[in-house]
């Protein structure tokens, strides 16, 4: 997708979300949903960048989100760091952990990465609940209950101040989205496309797969951790329940609905998924049943998500993908 | 006529590889298809054997159109593809590779018979029954690939660049073997770039360039065609 | 002290043998189809519920004999048709591996929640396959443990025999080693894919029947089992059957010792650490090729 349509779609989507509070009159249910759409859209975008563009089968996105949340909560609760600083510290910690996981991981073949990152998420829960977690202030299985809100310009940004918090999140969302667009459109983005086509070919151009992958892993971990932190100061409480398969699957649906490697499709995916998740809430346990079934059906029937669907019905030439695929195929004959 | 391909088109993704290719092969013939690398020769053989997903046209083999058949059905009908890069089972012995060659239903009954035939044709394989395919030299592996193809009890062999990457003395040997197989009654379609010895076996020649047949005729026709002489036959 | 260690070793061997059964099924399906099955653990739970329905809910005659006789065709059919319906259509795309991972993740949630909505959230307990104990000198063995061990080893031996001595087994190996070569010799690749998936479903489902006697049938156990099976396969070398066998026994032992001496909560962390260290030095796993 060219830069213009990418930015247009992002601007329209976020612009629309941004003016909605004016019409919804700050109703708390809607504000919560809108805020969660923003947070998840960024986390899911990061995942798309890793998986859809950099081609890293990382399943550790939820883990990084939770690490960000816990770091910021621990900094602000145990060390009395003011939250606006601690969220950035949390992002940094997450980025460092991302690099530590990435170093052994990114040299592995695709499925191994998925496995190690997923196992990492599963090991995180016993770690946080156990004595090691308690030692660093995770609060064990009780979690952390009084995480202070972000205090800035003499204002509290918390769950009782939904509208200001929403706009704070929106500002950070726009900044992070801009970072993602810049990454995708810089020579990094080109390098990723080259890597996707053929790692050998990219290597011959002097593109070091490992270096780029590690960098993008660090950056997306930072953003993901930052948003995890942002979230924890908003809700004020934190437990390992955030590591459940449910959260993971909801995030997965966003990317499946939006289409993998179809940025900014994933943003639309987040809008659809979060809204639907809320609408299905009265259905109790069947909500998860439907969510799981949806992943299966969408992957089978809409392999490129809604973005693929839109592309099928629109005649505009969004990409030059077709011409690219001919070249690669001809060289394989 | 044993095989007749009519207006065959094949695609890889968006790439249109074969464009209205038509060829005929009679029973007992050796037909050689020449053409530069990357112009669709392998695709032609793979389409014939049901290994290309997107193809259109007619492939009539022994009076039935097989274009929609799966590869296992085609093997069972008696057409075998012998790949240029051999496609052996690396962590299996020579014997296991050969036995798998006789996997299709029609070949099973003749497994013993064909094993004897193959071992008399390739005495070296008989000596190395237990060796892993991955540890064999290029020439031996090529022989094994041909031998495995023969195990399928096929009447029709589609051989992809049998002499590619072989030393001159092995080329001569492969040529001899193809000749011998043909004498035993197999019909053969060979694809080559420019190996004079193999071209020499041809009852009929085709030239495939950029997905189209640009020449068809006998060896003599080809020799009297100045362009071909220079480009392909190297004479 | 000595008897204590022996107990831990026995429990490690017991878990390890069942893990081997499950991990080898996974190694097989990955080696042949290259599909990353994230719903694998849900078939473990499915095995458990299958046994529970037959034994407790319906109270069928013949006990575990009937359960095993019925479970094998049942799990085969489930695996075969799921592969045909869900995985096989993805295979035409270049990024199908990633799609398959996502699809099977969705499937696992669907199945696990499905179990809860059908059977309720409470754990179900299965009757012991045999009662009683065997005393040799100072050592006391539970008959149940020994039967589970023997059954999983028998399952493994049957599997190895089928793989090396039957036409289907050779076809499966052929597809794993060279799918194009398999197509050339006329092996119906798609059917082999589905059959392999089905065989792996049987292996993990049987694993579920065996281990659920000791650990209850738990709809929330699926993810843990799936990851365990994957970790073992990766540790042993993706697609390597022998590697998975050793890895399963090592991980079974590690779990038993860590669980006993450091506490159950450290098991996952210890297993992950072992995996990370191994992969850092040997990215292809213990016995992986290339």
Image: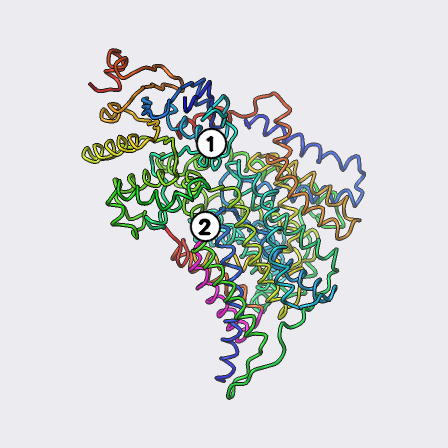
Observer-nearest of B161 and A99: B161
Does the image show residue A211?
A: no
Q: Is residue B131 magenta?
A: no
Instruction: Kindly identify the residue that appears in the image at 60 percent across and 21 percent down.
Output: A316
Q: Residue at x 38, y 47 (%)?
A: B99
In front of the other: A207 or A69: A207
Q: Considering depth in this image, is B72 or A118 the residue closer to the camera?
A: B72
Residue B50 bears which disc, if any?
Answer: 1
In the displayed structure, C258 sits above or below A259; it is below
Left or right? Give the position of A278 relative to B165. Answer: right
Q: Position of residue C49 (x, y in %)?
A: 68, 61
Instruction: Establish if C92 lies above or below C221.
Output: above
Chain to which mark 1 belongs: B
Question: Residue C44 sits in which quadrant?
Answer: bottom right
Query: Magenta stretch: dominant SS?
Result: helix
Report the span colored magenta.
C239-264
- Chain ID for label 2? C
């Amino acid at each position: 997708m060219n830069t213009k349509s990418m930015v247009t779609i992002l601007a329209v989507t976020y612009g629309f979300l941004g003016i909605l509070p004016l019409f919804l009159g700050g109703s708390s249910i809607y504000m919560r949903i809108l805020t969660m759409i923003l947070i998840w859209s960024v986390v899911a975008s990061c995942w798309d960048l890793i998986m859809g563009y950099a081609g890293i089968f990382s399943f550790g996105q939820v883990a990084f989100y939770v690490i960000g949340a816990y770091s910021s909560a621990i900094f602000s609760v145990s060390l009395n760091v003011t939250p606006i600083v601690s969220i950035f510290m949390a992002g940094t910690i997450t980025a460092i952990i991302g690099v530590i996981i990435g170093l052994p991981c990114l040299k592995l073949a695709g499925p191994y990465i998925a496995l190690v990152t997923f196992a990492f998420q599963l090991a995180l829960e016993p770690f946080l609940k156990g004595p090691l977690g308690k030692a660093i202030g995770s609060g064990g299985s009780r979690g952390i209950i009084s995480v202070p809100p972000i205090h800035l310009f003499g204002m509290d940004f918390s769950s009782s101040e939904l509208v200001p918090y929403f706009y704070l999140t929106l500002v950070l969302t726009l900044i992070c989205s801009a970072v993602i667009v810049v990454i995708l459109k810089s020579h990094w983005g080109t390098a990723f496309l080259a890597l996707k086509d053929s790692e050998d070919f990219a290597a011959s151009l002097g593109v070091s797969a490992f270096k780029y992958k590690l960098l993008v892993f660090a950056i997306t971990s930072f953003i993901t951790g930052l948003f995890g932190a942002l979230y924890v100061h908003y809700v004020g409480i934190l437990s390992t329940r955030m590591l459940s398969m449910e959260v993971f699957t909801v995030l997965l649906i966003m990317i499946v609905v939006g289409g993998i490697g179809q940025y900014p499709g994933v943003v639309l995916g987040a809008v659809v998924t979060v809204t639907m998740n809320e609408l299905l809430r009265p259905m109790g346990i069947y909500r998860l049943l439907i969510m799981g079934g949806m992943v299966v059906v969408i992957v089978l029937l809409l392999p490129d998500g809604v973005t693929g669907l839109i592309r099928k019905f629109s005649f505009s030439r969004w990409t030059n993908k077709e011409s690219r695929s001919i070249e690669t195929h001809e060289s394989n004959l | 006529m044993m095989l007749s391909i009519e207006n065959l088109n094949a695609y890889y993704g968006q790439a249109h590889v074969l464009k209205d290719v038509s060829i005929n092969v009679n029973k007992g013939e050796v037909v050689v298809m020449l053409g530069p690398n990357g112009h669709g020769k392998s695709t032609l053989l793979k389409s014939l054997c049901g290994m290309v997903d997107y193809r259109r046209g007619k492939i009539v083999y022994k009076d039935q159109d097989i274009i929609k058949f799966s590869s296992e059905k085609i093997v069972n009908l008696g057409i075998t593809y012998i790949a240029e890069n051999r496609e052996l089972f690396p962590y299996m012995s020579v014997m296991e590779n050969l036995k798998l060659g006789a996997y299709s239903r029609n070949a099973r009954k003749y497994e013993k018979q064909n094993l004897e035939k193959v071992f008399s044709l390739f005495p070296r394989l008989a000596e190395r029954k237990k060796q892993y395919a991955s540890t064999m030299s290029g020439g031996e592996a090529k022989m094994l690939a041909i031998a495995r193809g023969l195990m399928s009890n096929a009447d029709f062999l589609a051989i992809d660049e049998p002499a590619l990457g072989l030393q001159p003395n092995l080329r001569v040997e492969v040529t001899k073997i193809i000749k011998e197989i043909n004498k035993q009654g197999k019909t053969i379609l060979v694809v080559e770039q420019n190996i004079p010895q193999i071209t020499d076996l041809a009852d009929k020649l085709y030239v495939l360039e950029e997905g189209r047949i640009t020449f068809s005729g006998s060896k003599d026709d080809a020799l009297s065609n100045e362009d071909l002489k220079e480009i392909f036959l190297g004479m | 002290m000595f008897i204590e260690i022996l107990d831990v070793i026995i429990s490690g061997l017991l878990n390890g043998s069942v893990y081997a059964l499950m991990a080898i099924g996974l190694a097989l399906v990955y080696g042949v189809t290259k599909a990353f099955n994230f719903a694998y653990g849900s078939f473990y739970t499915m095995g458990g519920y299958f046994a529970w329905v037959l034994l407790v809910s319906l109270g069928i005659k013949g006990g575990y004999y009937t359960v095993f006789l019925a479970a094998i065709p049942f799990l085969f059919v489930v695996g075969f048709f799921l592969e045909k319906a869900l995985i096989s259509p993805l295979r035409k795309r270049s990024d199908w591996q990633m799609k398959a991972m996502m699809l099977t993740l969705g499937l696992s949630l669907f199945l696990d929640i499905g179990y809860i909505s059908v059977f309720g959230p409470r754990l179900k307990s299965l009757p012991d396959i045999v009662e009683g104990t065997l005393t040799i000198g100072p050592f006391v063995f539970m008959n149940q443990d020994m039967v589970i061990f023997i059954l999983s080893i028998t399952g493994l031996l049957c599997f190895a025999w089928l793989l090396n001595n039957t036409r289907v087994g050779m076809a499966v190996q052929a597809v794993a080693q060279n799918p194009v070569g398999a197509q050339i010799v006329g092996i119906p690749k798609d059917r082999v894919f589905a059959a392999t998936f089905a065989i792996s479903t049987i292996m993990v489902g049987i694993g579920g029947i065996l281990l659920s006697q000791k650990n209850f049938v738990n709809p929330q156990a699926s993810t843990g089992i799936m990851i365990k099976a994957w970790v073992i396969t990766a540790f042993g070398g993706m697609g390597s059957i022998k590697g998975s066998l050793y890895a399963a026994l090592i991980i079974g032992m590690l779990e038993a010792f860590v669980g006993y001496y450091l506490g159950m909560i450290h098991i996952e962390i210890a297993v992950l650490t072992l995996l990370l260290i191994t992969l850092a030095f040997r990215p292809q796993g213990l016995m992986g090729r290339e």
